[in-house]
Protein backbone atom coordinates (compact mmCIF):
# COMPACT_ATOMS: atom_id res chain seq x y z
CA UNK A 1 0.00 0.00 0.00
CA UNK A 2 1.35 3.40 -0.88
CA UNK A 3 0.15 6.97 -0.71
CA UNK A 4 1.97 9.31 -3.04
CA UNK A 5 1.01 12.85 -4.01
CA UNK A 6 -2.71 12.63 -4.49
CA UNK A 7 -2.97 8.96 -5.28
CA UNK A 8 -3.27 5.67 -3.45
CA UNK A 9 -2.22 2.28 -4.75
CA UNK A 10 -3.13 -1.16 -3.43
CA UNK A 11 -1.66 -4.43 -4.72
CA UNK A 12 -3.48 -7.62 -3.80
CA UNK A 13 -3.03 -11.21 -4.87
CA UNK A 14 -6.28 -13.11 -5.42
CA UNK A 15 -6.42 -16.88 -5.77
CA UNK A 16 -8.70 -16.91 -8.81
CA UNK A 17 -8.10 -16.98 -12.59
CA UNK A 18 -7.55 -13.62 -14.27
CA UNK A 19 -10.81 -13.86 -16.31
CA UNK A 20 -12.74 -14.45 -13.12
CA UNK A 21 -11.19 -11.41 -11.41
CA UNK A 22 -11.88 -9.28 -14.49
CA UNK A 23 -15.52 -10.37 -14.31
CA UNK A 24 -15.67 -9.33 -10.64
CA UNK A 25 -14.73 -5.79 -11.76
CA UNK A 26 -17.05 -5.59 -14.77
CA UNK A 27 -20.16 -7.70 -14.08
CA UNK A 28 -22.73 -5.63 -12.10
CA UNK A 29 -23.96 -8.71 -10.18
CA UNK A 30 -20.38 -9.34 -9.08
CA UNK A 31 -19.60 -5.71 -8.19
CA UNK A 32 -22.46 -5.44 -5.69
CA UNK A 33 -21.02 -8.39 -3.79
CA UNK A 34 -17.81 -6.72 -2.73
CA UNK A 35 -17.43 -3.04 -3.63
CA UNK A 36 -18.97 -1.10 -0.75
CA UNK A 37 -17.89 0.65 2.45
CA UNK A 38 -18.03 -1.27 5.74
CA UNK A 39 -21.49 -0.94 7.28
CA UNK A 40 -23.02 -0.57 3.82
CA UNK A 41 -24.13 -2.97 1.10
CA UNK A 42 -24.13 -2.86 -2.67
CA UNK A 43 -27.75 -2.94 -3.82
CA UNK A 44 -27.83 -2.25 -7.55
CA UNK A 45 -25.27 -1.83 -10.27
CA UNK A 46 -25.17 -1.46 -14.01
CA UNK A 47 -22.19 -1.44 -16.30
CA UNK A 48 -21.24 -1.00 -19.94
CA UNK A 49 -17.57 -1.99 -20.16
CA UNK A 50 -16.41 -0.33 -23.38
CA UNK A 51 -14.53 2.93 -23.92
CA UNK A 52 -17.02 5.75 -23.28
CA UNK A 53 -19.40 3.30 -21.58
CA UNK A 54 -20.63 4.05 -18.09
CA UNK A 55 -21.41 2.17 -14.94
CA UNK A 56 -22.80 2.83 -11.50
CA UNK A 57 -23.03 1.16 -8.15
CA UNK A 58 -25.54 2.16 -5.45
CA UNK A 59 -25.14 1.38 -1.75
CA UNK A 60 -27.64 1.05 1.05
CA UNK A 61 -27.10 1.13 4.78
CA UNK A 62 -27.70 -2.08 6.71
CA UNK A 63 -31.38 -1.14 7.16
CA UNK A 64 -31.76 -1.06 3.36
CA UNK A 65 -31.95 2.73 3.08
CA UNK A 66 -30.25 4.01 -0.10
CA UNK A 67 -27.04 5.82 0.76
CA UNK A 68 -25.38 6.93 -2.49
CA UNK A 69 -22.66 5.25 -4.49
CA UNK A 70 -20.22 5.68 -7.36
CA UNK A 71 -20.47 6.11 -11.09
CA UNK A 72 -17.75 5.88 -13.71
CA UNK A 73 -16.94 6.20 -17.37
CA UNK A 74 -14.39 3.98 -19.14
CA UNK A 75 -11.39 5.76 -20.62
CA UNK A 76 -9.37 2.69 -21.54
CA UNK A 77 -10.05 -1.04 -21.59
CA UNK A 78 -7.84 -4.04 -22.32
CA UNK A 79 -9.97 -7.13 -21.72
CA UNK A 80 -8.78 -9.22 -18.78
CA UNK A 81 -5.85 -6.84 -18.26
CA UNK A 82 -6.71 -3.23 -17.63
CA UNK A 83 -9.56 -0.83 -16.86
CA UNK A 84 -9.14 2.95 -16.59
CA UNK A 85 -12.11 4.99 -15.44
CA UNK A 86 -13.15 8.52 -14.69
CA UNK A 87 -14.57 8.03 -11.20
CA UNK A 88 -17.29 10.09 -9.50
CA UNK A 89 -19.34 9.95 -6.36
CA UNK A 90 -23.09 9.43 -6.52
CA UNK A 91 -25.36 7.66 -8.98
CA UNK A 92 -25.89 8.46 -12.66
CA UNK A 93 -26.42 12.10 -13.43
CA UNK A 94 -24.33 13.13 -10.45
CA UNK A 95 -20.79 14.23 -10.92
CA UNK A 96 -20.14 14.13 -7.21
CA UNK A 97 -20.10 17.92 -6.99
CA UNK A 98 -17.27 18.01 -9.49
CA UNK A 99 -15.12 15.58 -7.56
CA UNK A 100 -13.72 13.53 -10.41
CA UNK A 101 -10.86 11.18 -9.82
CA UNK A 102 -9.24 8.43 -11.86
CA UNK A 103 -9.35 4.72 -11.19
CA UNK A 104 -6.98 2.27 -12.79
CA UNK A 105 -7.29 -1.50 -12.36
CA UNK A 106 -4.46 -3.68 -13.68
CA UNK A 107 -4.52 -7.46 -13.61
CA UNK A 108 -1.53 -9.76 -13.98
CA UNK A 109 -1.46 -13.54 -13.92
CA UNK A 110 1.00 -14.67 -11.25
CA UNK A 111 0.40 -18.42 -11.66
CA UNK A 112 -2.34 -20.88 -12.53
CA UNK A 113 -5.53 -19.59 -10.85
CA UNK A 114 -3.67 -16.69 -9.27
CA UNK A 115 -4.01 -13.01 -10.17
CA UNK A 116 -2.34 -9.86 -8.93
CA UNK A 117 -4.67 -6.87 -8.77
CA UNK A 118 -3.12 -3.39 -8.78
CA UNK A 119 -5.66 -0.70 -7.97
CA UNK A 120 -4.54 2.90 -8.40
CA UNK A 121 -6.97 5.65 -7.42
CA UNK A 122 -5.41 8.96 -8.32
CA UNK A 123 -6.18 12.62 -8.91
CA UNK A 124 -7.71 12.52 -5.47
CA UNK A 125 -6.46 16.02 -4.69
CA UNK A 126 -9.87 17.47 -5.41
CA UNK A 127 -11.88 14.43 -4.42
CA UNK A 128 -12.48 14.31 -0.69
CA UNK A 129 -14.72 11.35 0.13
CA UNK A 130 -18.33 12.43 -0.38
CA UNK A 131 -21.57 11.57 1.39
CA UNK A 132 -21.55 8.30 3.31
CA UNK A 133 -17.97 7.69 2.19
CA UNK A 134 -16.51 10.66 4.00
CA UNK A 135 -17.46 9.86 7.58
CA UNK A 136 -14.85 10.97 10.12
CA UNK A 137 -12.19 12.33 7.80
CA UNK A 138 -10.42 15.57 8.52
CA UNK A 139 -11.65 17.02 5.26
CA UNK A 140 -15.28 16.40 6.21
CA UNK A 141 -14.65 18.16 9.50
CA UNK A 142 -13.04 21.11 7.75
CA UNK A 143 -15.98 21.41 5.34
CA UNK A 144 -18.45 21.11 8.19
CA UNK A 145 -16.64 23.85 10.00
CA UNK A 146 -16.93 26.02 6.88
CA UNK A 147 -20.62 25.11 6.55
CA UNK A 148 -21.31 26.04 10.16
CA UNK A 149 -19.57 29.33 9.62
CA UNK A 150 -21.74 30.17 6.60
CA UNK A 151 -24.83 29.31 8.59
CA UNK A 152 -23.92 31.59 11.47
CA UNK A 153 -22.98 34.34 9.02
CA UNK A 154 -26.40 33.95 7.37
CA UNK A 155 -28.08 34.52 10.71
CA UNK A 156 -26.05 37.64 11.45
CA UNK B 1 -8.47 30.58 -4.22
CA UNK B 2 -7.08 27.91 -1.92
CA UNK B 3 -4.94 26.59 -4.78
CA UNK B 4 -3.43 30.03 -5.32
CA UNK B 5 -2.79 30.39 -1.59
CA UNK B 6 -1.02 27.05 -1.60
CA UNK B 7 1.70 28.62 -3.79
CA UNK B 8 2.59 31.08 -1.07
CA UNK B 9 1.63 34.30 0.65
CA UNK B 10 -0.48 36.66 -1.44
CA UNK B 11 -2.55 39.78 -1.04
CA UNK B 12 -6.34 39.91 -1.19
CA UNK B 13 -5.97 41.78 -4.50
CA UNK B 14 -3.88 38.89 -5.90
CA UNK B 15 -6.66 36.52 -4.95
CA UNK B 16 -9.43 38.64 -6.42
CA UNK B 17 -7.89 39.02 -9.90
CA UNK B 18 -7.78 35.43 -11.25
CA UNK B 19 -11.14 34.68 -9.63
CA UNK B 20 -12.58 37.80 -11.39
CA UNK B 21 -14.04 39.02 -8.13
CA UNK B 22 -14.29 42.44 -6.63
CA UNK B 23 -11.82 43.22 -3.86
CA UNK B 24 -14.75 43.29 -1.40
CA UNK B 25 -15.98 39.85 -2.48
CA UNK B 26 -12.46 38.36 -2.25
CA UNK B 27 -12.00 39.95 1.15
CA UNK B 28 -15.24 38.35 2.32
CA UNK B 29 -14.08 34.92 1.08
CA UNK B 30 -10.78 35.34 2.89
CA UNK B 31 -12.63 36.28 6.08
CA UNK B 32 -14.61 33.02 5.85
CA UNK B 33 -11.44 30.97 5.31
CA UNK B 34 -9.80 32.85 8.16
CA UNK B 35 -12.67 32.10 10.56
CA UNK B 36 -12.63 28.46 9.49
CA UNK B 37 -8.98 28.38 10.57
CA UNK B 38 -7.63 27.72 7.07
CA UNK B 39 -5.98 31.07 6.45
CA UNK B 40 -3.87 33.56 8.43
CA UNK B 41 -4.03 37.22 7.49
CA UNK B 42 -1.50 39.92 8.35
CA UNK B 43 -1.55 43.60 7.55
CA UNK B 44 1.54 45.04 5.81
CA UNK B 45 1.07 48.71 5.06
CA UNK B 46 -2.06 49.00 2.94
CA UNK B 47 -2.00 45.34 1.96
CA UNK B 48 -3.63 42.41 3.65
CA UNK B 49 -1.40 39.38 3.11
CA UNK B 50 -2.83 35.90 3.41
CA UNK B 51 -1.14 32.57 4.03
CA UNK B 52 -2.60 29.10 4.12
CA UNK B 53 -2.39 27.29 7.45
CA UNK B 54 -0.79 23.94 6.85
CA UNK B 55 -2.35 22.08 9.74
CA UNK B 56 -5.98 21.77 8.62
CA UNK B 57 -4.73 20.79 5.16
CA UNK B 58 -2.59 18.08 6.65
CA UNK B 59 -5.79 16.83 8.24
CA UNK B 60 -7.42 17.07 4.82
CA UNK B 61 -4.83 14.62 3.56
CA UNK B 62 -6.45 12.10 5.85
CA UNK B 63 -8.82 11.49 3.01
CA UNK B 64 -6.02 9.74 1.16
CA UNK B 65 -5.61 7.40 4.13
CA UNK B 66 -9.35 6.94 4.03
CA UNK B 67 -9.23 5.81 0.39
CA UNK B 68 -6.27 3.60 1.08
CA UNK B 69 -8.16 1.77 3.83
CA UNK B 70 -11.35 1.71 1.78
CA UNK B 71 -9.78 0.05 -1.26
CA UNK B 72 -7.62 -2.24 0.82
CA UNK B 73 -10.75 -3.47 2.68
CA UNK B 74 -12.59 -3.84 -0.62
CA UNK B 75 -9.86 -5.87 -2.33
CA UNK B 76 -9.68 -8.09 0.76
CA UNK B 77 -13.43 -8.62 0.43
CA UNK B 78 -13.05 -9.30 -3.32
CA UNK B 79 -10.42 -11.94 -2.58
CA UNK B 80 -12.63 -13.57 0.08
CA UNK B 81 -15.67 -13.65 -2.25
CA UNK B 82 -13.74 -15.08 -5.22
CA UNK B 83 -11.76 -17.58 -3.17
CA UNK B 84 -15.02 -18.85 -1.60
CA UNK B 85 -16.47 -19.21 -5.13
CA UNK B 86 -13.39 -21.15 -6.27
CA UNK B 87 -13.67 -23.51 -3.29
CA UNK B 88 -17.36 -24.08 -4.06
CA UNK B 89 -16.67 -24.77 -7.76
CA UNK B 90 -14.03 -27.34 -6.86
CA UNK B 91 -16.49 -29.35 -4.80
Image (tube, helix red, strand yellow):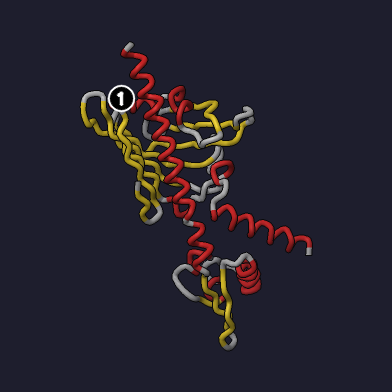
* For residue B1, above or below residue A134: below
* For residue A22, above or below residue B5: above
For mark 1, does the 10 Å Cα neighbourhood hold few (<14), some (14 to 19), or many (20 or more) residues? many
Decide which of A93, B55 is in the foreground and name it. B55
Of all residues shown, which one is farthest toward the right?
A156
Image quadrant in which the C terminus of chain A is located = bottom right
Decide which of A144, A54 is in the foreground and name it. A144
Is residue A66 rendered to the left or right of residue B7?
Answer: right
Q: Looking at the picture, how far across and down is residue A83, in whole percent?
A: 34, 35
Residue at the spot x=35%, y=40% of the render? Answer: A119
Residue at the spot x=51%, y=57% of the render? Answer: B60
Q: Secondary structure at mark 1?
A: loop
Q: Looking at the picture, how far across and down is residue B70, in whole percent?
A: 46, 41
Which chain is home to disc 1? A
Q: Looking at the picture, how far across and down is residue B32, in whole percent?
A: 64, 66
Decide which of A91, B84 is in the foreground and name it. B84
Is residue A100 rendered to the left or right of residue A77?
Answer: right
Is residue A146 rendered to the left or right of residue A112?
Answer: right
Of all residues shown, which one is farthest toward the bottom?
B45
Residue at the spot x=42%, y=46% of the render? Answer: B68
* For residue B8, above or below residue B65: below
User: What residue is pinned by disc 1?
Assistant: A16
Of all residues shown, which one is farthest toward the top?
B91
Residue at the spot x=42%, y=28% of the render? Answer: A48
Of all residues shown, which one is farthest toward the left?
A111
Q: Looking at the picture, how far across and down is residue B22, in whole percent?
A: 62, 71
Amino acid sequence: MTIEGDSVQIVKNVKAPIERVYRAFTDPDELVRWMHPDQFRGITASNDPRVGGRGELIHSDLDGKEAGGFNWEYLEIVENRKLVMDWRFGGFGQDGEGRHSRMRIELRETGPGSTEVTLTHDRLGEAPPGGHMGVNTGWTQALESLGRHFETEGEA
Amino acid sequence: MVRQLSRGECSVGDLARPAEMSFAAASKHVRVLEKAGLVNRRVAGRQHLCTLRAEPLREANEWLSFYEKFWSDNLDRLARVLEADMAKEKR
